[in-house]
Image: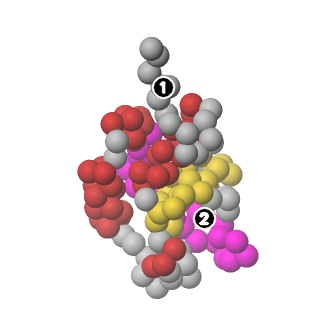
Amino acid sequence: MSSHRKNEATIIQLINDSWIKMTVPQKRLWESIAIDPVQWVFHPHSSPRSTAWVVAVVGIHAIWYDDYYGEMDDGFKVSEHISFAEIGWGKSGDGSLEAVLQFILHQINGLTYGEPTTPPAQP
């Protein structure tokens, strides 16, 4: 486990830094699913129970900040939650909140990651 775990004020600052970089659709989604940062139980792979900062919940997914393993792996992730306030192991995300929100937008729109979220213009 990393010795540099983040506090709530740092998580809020990371969210604020991400807000500036979000697209309009990402901001709309964020406004709909964001919660005040709260620590949930986290079950890292083959490691003891820990906690993680959850910043949004959408359906069966939780968006959380991963600072468990070390600075090289720090960043926002999305995982299915086992139950409310408990995150499972599976995770996706490259570390940026914007990328995680884009992943969720693609899931909502039934697209695979990398496809445009808006249809092409009709002639």
Q: Quadrant of the N terminus?
A: bottom right
Q: Secondary structure at mark 2?
A: strand
Q: Amino acid at mark 2?
A: Phe
Q: Name the residue at the bottom extreme.
A: 3
Q: Residue at x 51, y 61 (%)?
A: 94
Could you tell me if residue 92 is visible in this image?
Answer: yes
Give the crowd class for mark 2: few <14, some 14-19, many >=20 residues within 10 Å.
Answer: many
The magenta span reads 33-57
Residue in front for this viewpoint, 123 or 54: 123
Q: Residue at x 57, y 33 (%)?
A: 108
Horizontal relation, residue 31 to residue 52: left or right: left
Query: Which SS type dominates the magenta stretch?
Result: strand
Q: Amino acid at mark 1?
A: Pro
Q: Earlier in the sequence, mark 1 or mark 2?
A: 2
Horizontal relation, residue 96 to residue 23: left or right: right
How far across and how far down the image is residue 106, in percent? 55, 38
Horizontal relation, residue 69 to residue 33: left or right: right
Q: Is residue 73 magenta?
A: no
Residue 24, image quadrant = top left
How far across and how far down the image is residue 112, in percent? 62, 41
Could you tell me if residue 12 is visible in this image?
Answer: no
Q: Name the residue at the right extreme.
A: 46
Q: Residue at x 66, y 67 (%)?
A: 43
Q: Name the residue at the front extreme.
A: 123
* Residue 42 numbered mark, or none: 2
Q: Which residue is mark 1?
A: 120
Give the crowd class for mark 1: few <14, some 14-19, many >=20 residues within 10 Å.
Answer: few
Q: Quadrant of the C terminus?
A: top left
How far across and how far down the image is residue 8, in percent? 35, 64
